[in-house]
Amino acid sequence: MTAVTLFSDESKTMTENASILQRTKKLLKRFSAKSADSAKSDAIRQKISEQRKNVEQWKSGERYSEYYEREMDAVAEVYEEAFHNIDRTYQLEYLKAHGLKPELSLLDYGCGPLGAGIHFIRYLDHGCYVGADISKKFLELGQGWIEKYGLADKGARTFHIPAGDLSPLHGLKFDFVWAQSVITHMPGEDVNYLLSQIGGLMKPEGAFLATFLFPTGEEIAGGVQREGERTWIYGRDFLEQMAARHGLRVRILEDFHHPQEGRKADRKIAVMEVRHA
């Protein structure tokens, strides 16, 4: 087993200006392309400018999730269609293949504005869906989508979890916890914080399933590799050792397929299945 470093100073280091500029250009391309008119494009550009300032204010004493919460709130203010731009039923189909049934309870961790949540709510029985996200503004958008799709009578609940603090869900227990493209954007200390809490929300036979970027070749030195400003790749040993610290066990599943997954030779999108040890 490879010895891993659970925390890295790199994840708390100030983002360099070149990285900020690169991220800004990517955001402009991504969000402006989806704007129907130039006025919205201008608003997006202005908000991205503010996001750059937020990134520059990220300090070593601040958790990354606090910065990320600000960024997602900023995006929500100018991009109401966020995460509803593609059919996300593939997430529902994946969980159904792993045992999700209408009568079982689901926590959609990092649900955003309910891009996939809408499909979960429609499928699950009344009151079985709970969404949680660090962005309060995304959750507000999600409530609008619930109304739009006529699902207000399904008893879905959403919770704001500032900087990933799951205490608002205290007392709830779930058969499934799902996190799509969340771990991918978390540094090691935030993954550790999540795992320290998630076991308390899982039923004895419950499962936490989370997508992440998984190396397809040799184990990553130190267990974790940062790529760019907001992407982390995690090795098997890193995740197993971190989960064990909190009385959990991990199994890596390589059967998940994202419809927009980019193909790279050295990594793939996989799922970590977390259960009580």
Image: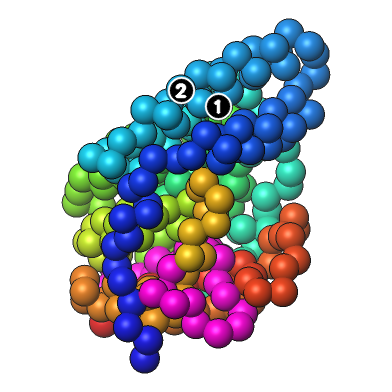
Query: Quick check: 31 above or below 11?
Result: above
Query: Does dot 1 land on a helix, a strand or a loop?
Result: helix
Front position in the image: 98 or 33: 33
- In space, the residues marked 1 and 2 are separated at their CA atoms by 14 Å
Which stretch did the figure color magenta? Answer: 203-224
The picture quadrant where one finds residue 7 is: bottom left
Q: How is the image coloured?
A: rainbow
Residue under circle 1?
A: 75
- Report whether residue 62 is seen: yes
Q: Residue at x 56, y 66 (%)?
A: 213
Residue found at x 55% / y 57%:
227
- Residue sitting farthest toward the bottom: 1
Outermost residue to the top: 39
**Above or below: residue 156 compared with residue 246:** above
Q: Is residue 163 left or right of residue 111?
A: left
Check if mark 1's residue and mark 2's residue have beta carbons within 8 Å: no
User: Is 67 in front, or is 37?
Assistant: 67
Q: Residues within 10 Å of mark 1 (few under 14, many from 20)?
A: many
Q: Secondary structure at mark 2?
A: helix
Kind of residue sitting beneath label 1:
Val
* Residue at the (55%, 85%) spot, across then down: 218
User: Mark 1 or 2 closer to N-term?
Assistant: 2
Percent position of residue 105, x then y: 40, 57
Residue 141 visible here: no
| Magenta residue check for 215 | yes
Tag 2 residue = 53
**Tag on residue 257?**
none
- The quarter of the rendered structure image containing the C terminus is bottom left
Give percent across and percent down for residue 79: 63, 24
Which kind of residue does numbered mark 2 sit on?
Lys
Residue 148 vertical position relative to residue 237 in the rendered view, above or below:
above
